[in-house]
Image: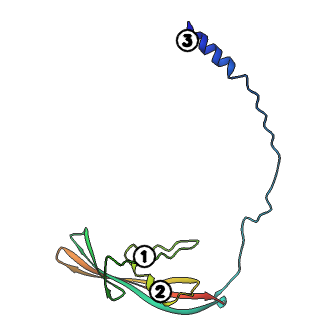
Amino acid sequence: MFGLLALMVMSFSSCSGLRKTTGVQTTSFVPNVVRVESNIRDYVQLGETTVDVEYHTYLGIFTTIDKINGKDYNFRDVKYTMLEGKTNIKLGGRISKALYKAVEEYPGADYYVPVVMQTEVQRMFLGKYMKESVVIKAYKLK
């Protein structure tokens, strides 16, 4: 009986509040799209460089990096560089360790564009030797 009485009190008390909502039409004058017209004549090519990673894979699961940009790999001194922008350029995890070379050679560049990616594979018994290289062109706005 007490439960029924409590339920009735709670159901009547839930209707006791007053809520007022007002809606008005409004608009924003901030543009949705800002468009910049440019073409290749607006850029200066600073140069191009090739970055590369050499590594071994054993049994399909164990990977050992041998060289980055022609130098022996030191796992204690690793530099990661990601090429990002409106549409991120996905260059695998290992090659991102070699991209620092392009930024160091052309620090004043506004854009870095990978143009060619090449992978060399040498099959071995229970493993393979791989070399990934990417040619990157550096551009600056005039």
Name the one closer to the observer, 96 or 123.
96
Res 44 quadrant in image: bottom right
Above or below, 123 against 47 in this view is above
Name the one closer to the observer, 15 or 116.
15
Q: Residue placed at 50% from the left, 74% from the top?
A: 89
Question: Where residue 8 sits in the image (x, y, percent)?
Answer: 63, 13
**Residue underneath mark 1:** 80
Q: CA distance from mark 1 to mark 3?
A: 65 Å
What amino acid type is highlighted by mark number 3? Gly
Kindly give the residue lying farthest to the top in the view shown.
Answer: 1
What amino acid type is highlighted by mark number 1? Tyr
For label 1, the SS is loop
Question: Where residue 130 sits in the image (x, y, percent)?
Answer: 29, 80
What amino acid type is highlighted by mark number 2? Ala
- Mark 2 or mark 1, which is nearer the start of the sequence? 1
For label 3, the SS is helix
If the image is split into quadrants, where does the N terminus sit? Answer: top right
Is 115 on the left or on the right of 68, as rendered? Answer: right
For label 2, the SS is helix
